[in-house]
Image (cartoon, grey):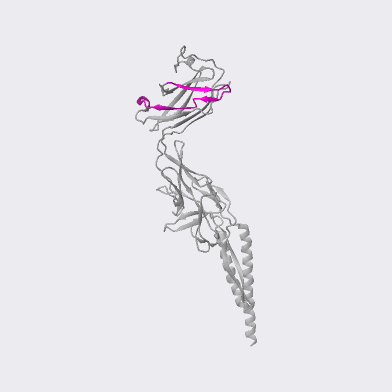
Amino acid sequence: MSYNIALSGLQATTQDLNTISNNIANASTVGFRGGRSEFAAIYNGGHAGGVSVMSTSQNFSKGGSLTYTGRQLDMGIQGDGFFVLKGLDGGAMYARAGMFHQDAKGYVIDPVGNRLQGYAVGAAGRLQTGNTGDLQVQTASLAAKATTDVGLVSNLDARVDVIDPLVTPFDATKMDSYHSSGTVSVYDSLGTEHALTQYYVKTAPNDWSVHYMMDGVDVTPAGGHQLNFDSNGVLTGGQSLTLNINDPAILGGASALNFDVNYDKSTQYAATYNNSSLSQDGYTSGDLKGVRLDENGLLFGTYTNGQEQLQGQVVLANFSNPNGLEPVSNNAWVATNTAGQAITGSPATGTMGTITGGYLEGSNVDTTAEMVNLMSAQRNYQSNAKVLDVNSTMQQALLNAI
């Protein structure tokens, strides 16, 4: 009986050594989860029968440390969850290793070609959160967008003297016919940039007339535009207007340019004229130059015109029993009935962790602890082998006595 017990000890220790050696071998594997051999005593009718390895559990409670790589599509998960991958055979796999890049068609893939899954973006630029699919970065150029809104927040100096327009008519070439001016860029449908200059003339206490020039052409609307302030310097009239530009001399072959000019929150204080905010929503065309990922898994394309466009969102999956996942090659797991149903969702929602772009999560193996475990396993193996040796000696002594 002791011979069989010692033999079971050798077998169990061999399995433990396999687990330890696999942990040590993968100490530098991105997203790897260390395993642990779980032993169980064997009894036959109350008599000791040795030991067996019930299972090898994986440590999903401890995360690996994040290491900065600077690569745009490297991703590290902080917290719970797994990347969802579609294998080359169409099957679903799950991974913590976030080493991704784009293939020739713009799909986000891992080093062996499995496609990262996420929410796609519809024609209107909104996430389609109903179903997951292959994440793809659109490599086409970003079309130009004509300006539709201009925002100006300015302070007009209340201390300046009134200019009578009948005595001194406005003339952009004569500085004594206006008090101050500011310029903002706007874009037409072809992406051509135009300079829109506003000239401010104080025509009465708390009243200002605004004239508009675009590329040297007067585009002031009929009747002009007036800004009115109260005695506290707060804008009370003329907060906005719409400019309609259709002069071919300005636009060339572009479509008519219609945009709103908003002066909300502009003031008239006894301080030097200044612009605290200038904004407009148009831009010229641009080519894709890179991608950016935020902590919510939103993937943006960045363009040479300074714009960003949403390309999709990475989704994460979680399981009620991650230890039930079956590890497979290439840093992945596949789901089993023991793991439970995969629950998918956006990063930083529910139980899902966050995603950090430009980082990779390392293995959670503690090499020092594994070396200690290795020495313990070696001692156990030697001890069980010694029991076999003693059994053999005793049997030999018995045979010699017969």
In the rendered view, tell whether residue 129 sits above or below residue 277. Answer: below
Q: Residue at x 36, y 24 (%)?
A: 249
In the rendered view, tell whether residue 54 sits above or below residue 91. Answer: below
Q: Quadrant of residue 142?
A: top left
Coordinates of residue 347 in the picture (x, y in percent): 53, 49
Left or right, residue 255 beside residue 363: left
Quadrant for the C terminus in the image: bottom right
Coordinates of residue 247 in the picture (x, y in percent): 36, 25
Quadrant for the N terminus in the image: bottom right
Q: Is residue 144 magenta?
A: no
Q: Give the farthest residue toward the bottom.
A: 402
Task: Name the foreground residue: 234 vs 388.
Answer: 234
In the rendered view, tell whether residue 27 sits above or below residue 284. Answer: below
- Tell me, yes or no, if residue 109 can be seen here: no
- Which contiguous range is marked in magenta? 223-250
Task: Name the foreground residue: 287 vs 268.
Answer: 268
Coordinates of residue 173 in the picture (x, y in percent): 44, 17
Coordinates of residue 256 in the picture (x, y in percent): 37, 30
Q: Is residue 224 magenta?
A: yes
